[in-house]
Image: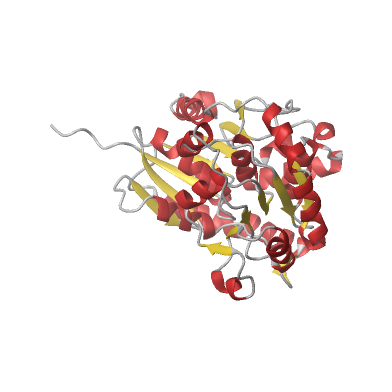
Amino acid sequence: MSAPPKPLLIYGVNGDGRGHAARALVLAPYLRPYYRLAFHSSQDALALLRQSFVNQDDIAFVEISGTRWIYRHRRISPWRSALHFLAQALWVFPWEARRLVHTWRDTPPAGVICDFEPVVARAAALAGLPLVALSHQHAMAVMDPAKLGLWPFQQWIYRLYAWLNTPRFGALVISSFFQLPLRTRASPTLVVGGLLRPELLQLSQGDQRVEGAPLAYLRRQCPPQPVLIGLQQLAPGTVVFGLDDSQGLAFSRLRFCPVDPNGFLIFLAAAPFLVAAAGHQLLCEAMELQKPVLALYERAHDEQRLNARLWERAGYGMAVELESFETHHLKAFIERLPRYRCALQQRVGAQDNAPATACWMLRQLQAPPSAWR
């Protein structure tokens, strides 16, 4: 007699960038023994998930509308981005959530995990499904604003933003490289450090005496030329991810690579330092591998600004506004590398958080309805 089919688990992943998808890659192996996974995502995250799970019968993919920054002249337009998101939150996301619920009628899901993905979060609430929210952004909404360096008004904005993304959930997992006390705790909450792939943990525990090339990870929407000029002058041979290789004609001393999850980790493990956008997931990975980072944030990207400044405050690297970047910033960062490495070596090594986090999420998903409503 064949075994009964595994129940279906909907996994919503924010599509802006690849950090949210990287967390999904970490947790998926611990969820697959119990569920068939249907990833709902968009943009870069959906592309990375599809690339990582090719020809897997127990994994499906659904493309949905996603949040995104609006750029003007290759810079984030804060007001356009805010108005675009508000319009999505009031009209687009609710409409698409109702459409999703209709598609779930034939094969009802057993539960939902939502990594800061607003369509799936709304659909789970409409369908009355258990929902475990997973994000880094909720840290800014519920942690002590004074210790984060935020004004109360700024935290109010983060709370509104988090609520518009995930209006209702049964339990919350906050993955954050900074660990600060919670100011509010309205539902079961688990605070963990970075969620790191087993391959990365193996690389972090292996022989890293062979030093490779510096690593740069840049967002293609932003003007990369000043950063590339500085790298070509002061760090030739740097491996650059996130941009297309058309830049190679002008920057022949740099190596441009397409995004590949396994190849990226190999270069990351060997790199002496990183020059990268201040995404939370990448900072977690760099911290585990004890790699100093020159963390670049866009002027209007509040989340990455906070990530970068907390990274600098911890002594692990330098925070620089991308629009103001000049070659002397990179020169100063390289000169201070011994200091940053010393600070990283003083921190307590991160544990393998993924199995315990996945186990906690499974318990929340399988709890009786009275526990999560």
Q: With 208 as the anchor, is 184 left or right in this view? A: right
Find residue 160 and report its horizontal and vertical position in percent: 73, 45
Quarter that holds the N terminus: top left
Q: Residue at x 57, y 74 (%)?
A: 246
In depth, the one of 198 and 126 nearer the eye is 198
Q: Is residue 128 visible?
A: no
Q: Quadrant of residue 310?
A: top right
Q: Is residue 125 found left or right of 38 in the rendered image? A: right
Vertical arrangement, residue 283 with respect to residue 354, above or below:
below
Which residue appears farthest toward the left when viewing the image?
Answer: 1
Nearest to the observer: residue 20 or residue 84: 20
On the image, the x and y values in percent for residue 365 come to 46, 30
Kindly tell me whether residue 254 is visible in this rendering.
yes
Identify the residue at horizontal 84%, vertical 38% (top origin).
149
Q: Please state the total of marks drawn on the protein image.
A: 0
Query: For the view shown, which residue lies furthest in the front direction?
Result: 210
Where does residue 108 sit, x and y in percent of width and height? 37, 42
Which residue is nearer to you in this view: 198 or 21? 198
Above or below — where is 153 with respect to 65? above
Q: Is residue 43 left or right of residue 232?
A: left
Query: Residue 55 location in percent, x, y?
Result: 30, 53
Q: How is the image coloured?
A: secondary structure
Q: Is residue 55 left or right of residue 168?
A: left
Q: Quadrant of the C terminus?
A: top right
Looking at the image, which residue is at 65% across and 66% down?
A: 221
Determine the image quadrant of residue 6.
top left
Q: Nearer the viewer, residue 267 or 12?
A: 267
| Location of residue 182 with respect to 124 vertically, above or below | above
